[in-house]
Amino acid sequence: MILSILAHTPIPRDLPLPLPLPEGLLKALLVVFFLVHILFVNLTVGGSILVAIFEGLGFRKRRYDLLALEIAKTVTVNKSLAVVMGIGPLLCINLVYTVEWYGANALTGHAWLLIIPLITLAFLLAYLHKYTWHRWESGGWKIGHWAIVLASTLLFLCIPFVFLANINLMLFPSEWEKVKGFFSSLRIGNVFPRYLHFLLASVALSGLAGAGWFWKATVVEKIPGFRRDELRRMFYRVAMWATGLQFIAGPILLFTLPGVGVTPLLYKIILPSAALGLCLWYALWKKVKGSDGNLSTGFFPIVCFFSVVVLGMGSGRHAYREAALASHQSQVRERSEDYQKQLEAWNTAHPEDAESDAETPEQLFATCAACHAPDQRLVGPSLKEIAVIYAGNPDGIVTWATAPGKKRPDYPPMPAFAHLGEEKLRTIADYILATAPK
């Protein structure tokens, strides 16, 4: 069984380039940068959900409409910070998990390419919603205005779902053969429990942020009909309920994790974090049920408590990722080392070629070797099968590689290799037909 899985797992060779920083430091930075980034993503998503809810309530009670407006002002700021703070983790994950990250991106296809247009549209709708608030306050215009925030919220919900699906997919290279596009990738791993956990965290964090932001007198005075202690208690209640629901979503997430990355270290990180989360929920409950005088203190200790829980959960996710990818990364490393040894041996045996800038057929074919093995299926068909289809027709291989289409439903689409040029593609085609097993 294990040999069967390995036979269908793409094991490409890595690029022999030095990392700009030690790998351990890059991974530590990835955890920290990602937590900072996800903080503002959570505030954007959770804030959008609260705006949509409170604006809906505002049809009957105007004070909720004014509250929604004040939250909407923070959403556009948080979404900008989320984009800026996303650069750091994106750079780190590109460096440390290059093969797995780009492999997952390629397999999810159009959904991944739509990320930028979706983000752009979501941002434009969020700005349109905020800056037309007072112009569309009456009659049917108000319903249209509410529809805008519902649309932007839906987009803010979709964008992290695509990211999360990609991050989930990169953990399981042995399952990549089953992927036929974005929707089929959702059957791998446990995408939906992860997403539920993310949504509840977004609402909990937005509730906690609201408890701090709407305690400021300069903000509260813009919302007639609400008292400062009333607002803080309401947002504490939002955080309390979302945190409480995490004790349902969390175990579902943990127990649906594929076993490939589950280790004792994961439990050593997650279980203490969950215990601290229970203490956090109790602190929030005390605030909700306590007196008004109790609301004026204790906010920053709760924030610190929340931060420790989030750091624990983020560290647990990283521990799972490391364990899940350990075997694949080891195989990629071995293949890369073998390739370098073969290249050095070739250069030693053929010094005249080593001094030449021209790439050998073997070197050119290395571009294709991640997906095409001699006599077994990887991501694409084997060389043996290709040689049968294109026997005596290397130009057919060149034409296909220049502008490939979608031939078979059980294979992912092949990317175009027109950038290599016709001469190199012809060299590769001749090499395939000459070396493919008979």
Image (cartoon, rainbow, N blue to C red):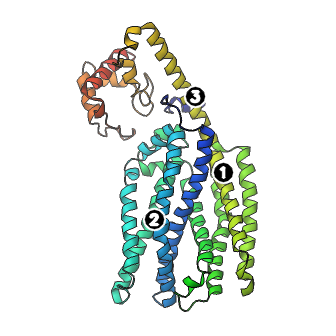
Q: Is label 3 in a helix, a strand or a loop?
A: helix
Q: Which residue is mark 1?
A: 315
Left or right relative to 78: residue 148: left
Which residue carries the number 2 mark?
Answer: 156
Label 3 with label 2: CB-CB less than 8 Å: no
Marks 2 and 1, the one that precedes in the sequence: 2
Label 1 CA crowd tier, 10 Å (few <14, some 14–19, many 20+): many
The residue positioned 29% from the left and 36% from the top of the image is 404
For badge 3, the amino acid type reads Leu
- The answer to which image quadrant residue 140 occupies is bottom left
- 162 over 404 or under it: above or below: below
What amino acid does circle 2 point to? Answer: Phe
Location of residue 393 in the rendering, given as x and y in whole percent from the top left corner: 24, 21
Q: Position of residue 40 (x, y in %)?
A: 53, 63
Residue 166 at x, y = what percent? 49, 49
Mark 3 residue crowding within 10 angstroms, few (<14) / some (14–19) / many (20+) = few
For the C terminus, give its image quadrant. top left
SS label for mark 2: helix
Which one is nearer the viewer's eye here, 171 or 102? 102
The image shows residue 25, relative to residue 300, as above or below, that is above
Residue underneath mark 3: 3
Contact, CB < 8 Å: mark 2 with mark 1? no
Q: Is residue 291 visible?
A: no
Where disc 1 sits, the SS reads helix
Measure the alpha-carbon separation of dots 3 and 2: 42 Å
Asked whether 265 or 78 is in front, the reply is 78
For the N terminus, the quadrant is top right
- Alpha carbon of mark 2 to alpha carbon of mark 1: how far? 25 Å
Rate crowding at label 2 as few (under 14), some (14 to 19) or many (20 or more) other CA atoms within 10 Å: many
- Give the camera-side residue of 6 and 228: 228
Give the vertical position of 119 relative to 145 (above or below): above
Q: Residue furthest top?
A: 349
